[in-house]
Image (tube, rainbow, N blue to C red):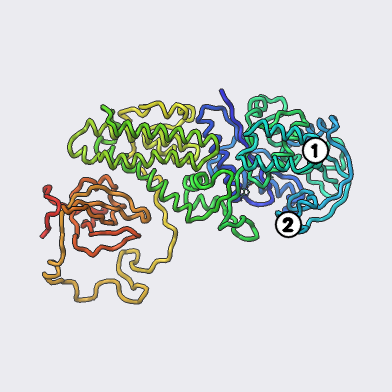
Amino acid sequence: MDSFYITTPIYYVNAKPHLGHAYTTIVADSLNRFHKLMGKDTYFLTGTDEHGDKIVKAAEANNQSPQEYVDTISALFRNLWPDLQCEHNDFIRTTEPRHVKVVQDILQKVYDKGDIYFGEYGGHYCYGCERFYTEKELVDGKCPDHLTEPEYISEKNYFFKMGKYQDWLKQHILNNPDFIRPEQYRNEVLSLLESGALEDLCISRPKSRLTWGIELPFDKDYVTYVWFDALINYISAIGYPEDEKFKEFWPVVNHLVAKDILKPHAVFWPTMLKAAEIEPYQNLNVHGYWLIKDTKMSKSLGNVVEPLKMKDTYGINAFRYFLLREMSFGQDSSFSEEALVGRLNADLANDLGNLFNRTLSMTHKYFGGVVPSPMDEEIEDVEIKKLGQQAMHTYQEEFAKLRFPRALEGLWELVRGLNKYIDTTAPWALFKEKNMDRLSTVMYVLLENMRKIAVHVWPVIPEASEEMLEQLGIQFDPRKFVLTKEPDVWGLLESGTEVAKSSNLFPRVELPEPQPVAKNGNGKAVKTSDGKKAGKEEGDEFIEFEDFQKLDLRVGTVLTVERHPDADRLLLVRVDLGEDEPRQVVAGLAEFFSPEDLEGRQVVVVANLKPRKLRKQVSQGMILAIKTEEGMELLTSSAEVINGSKVS
Ligand code: MSP
């Protein structure tokens, strides 16, 4: 069996988790789930980075000992991941003995080999970055990241002979095009390696300055530099050097990081591994930054996005889907609630949710909620199946390359294709014609494709995927579904399976917007913002007969129904009133009727109502309905009449 190993950076515990951490971990989880579904044995590691100056300072600021402090913040990270449906196999902390031991073993090995030496060093030290900067790297004498002036420190320290491995590293990157990806970051590292000699890396801190770290095994007066310590988590967690896990997973490791920590991962880490005589990692995958209104997220700017708040407001499915769908892996992306709501309403509620709603309720209406047996296929069926195969191949290929927006866009071709397929095959018309053979095939094509979609989205929105499958009468089990087979197999959904009545997985969401007051909770008229009474005046409960005559009431047949793209309660109903063109009526019926309930029905329409726009959609009339205790009933004719017949 093939294996796959994915890691996230181990996060500093000097601040609470935010959107950036959530993104990397959700991507790691999605990749882990994806490879699991591709039939691989997978391992997913995350954790926390707990040593160094930064942590000591944060603990002091919090009036806690470093240990108390790291325990608290590390737990925040550990507890967040299940809430975001990230199922890691292990959570490593750099303060754990299993990690400390491996760091000391590696230090000793590299020291014994002669690749670590003692020397004097003076440099510009940035406490924020916990590293020395060369003159060249400073911008106007300041740290380019923190924009603060570094302190000049001169002291004796231990150095790792990183420069010794520069040529090897360059060659390794050239020989392995996928070693660092996407390409822009590979090029960045290559040009750094070509721009001059690599300096050796200072890998110790004197205890006189910092005690919160892993003691050097060969000098008790020093602790290890936090990066030399932290990077080793990727092997200490899987039991380097002897554990079976190390043997199975290290050769297939994929590191996932953002561009901020490219250099430690692309330069320090492979050279450290080389010196310790360990094979280099397989891939380093580098993503861009989430920005808030085009600016960096920062505590001081107060624009940090808390992942749990987003999840609670919009649901975990929308949150995970948005993050993967929106950011092109490698590029920066802007986060906004508007964009999230837009995706949720368009892709999830309108496209995917609608497909499930419509099809499940039609299965109930036409087949008592049971998956029918398909009969002969027609050209439309063959075409949609082909489109599905293509969509699934695209999804799988792009996902494996971490091109998530392309993967999802590819799969959504099928989602949208199926919605169109419903419109063109018009199951309600087949039902009316009693063409049950054809209707069985159409419904089966829809339901089997929905099963395939539900399986494919599991890596991204696992909760929704499992619910969708449950609605199709299937218990999810990652070992039962193999993605690679899906594009080419047909008919795994068994005829006779009972499906759910409806599906309301992705309710539409509206961004709060200020609205003038028109009605109170009981539906009674209240004063509008301009102070006038919105209800009836006394004495005007009767109308003249002439007033009634002004109404042009007509009977028409509902052709198609769609949900309004921007309003939960509204449906866009196309009605045939016997005129040249069908009319669009925007009706507030979505709470009471699904589109399928209405399609094919005859309704009464106020045909001479002045057209008006409701949430940007033109409404050319009004459908009459009767309010009941339970909800709403349609006003209709006792027998089928010609469309356009007048009600008088
Ligand atoms: N402790 C080190 C990593 C050591 S790994 C051996 C560290 N920690 S961190 O808490 O600062 O996490 C940095 C990582 O968090 C980034 O590489 C990225 O994965 C994630 N993100 C933090 N801010 C981010 C954004 N604004 N956007 C996207 N991801 C970002 O560095």
Q: x%, y% of residue 94?
A: 72, 40
Residue at mark 2 to residue at mark 1: CA–CA distance: 38 Å
- Residue in the picture at 28% in, 42% down: 423
The outermost residue toward the top is 1
- Residue in the picture at 42% in, 35% down: 391
Question: How many marks overall?
Answer: 2
Q: Which amino acid does label 1 sit on?
A: Gly
Q: x%, y% of residue 369?
A: 29, 36
Element assignment for label 1: helix
Would you say the beta carbon of the disc 1 residue lies within 8 angstroms of ligand 1? Answer: no
Query: Toward the viewer: 27 or 184?
Result: 184
**Residue 163 circle label:** 1
Left or right of residue 218, residue 282 in this image: left
Name the residue tied to disc 2: 61
| Above or below for 575 versus 226 | below
- Residue in the picture at 39% in, 48% down: 349
> What crowding class fits label 1: few (fewer than 14 Cα within 10 Å), some (14-19), or many (20 or more)?
some
Would you say the beta carbon of the disc 2 residue lies within 8 angstroms of ligand 1? Answer: no
- Residue 95 visible in the shown view: no
Q: What residue type is labelled 2?
A: Ala
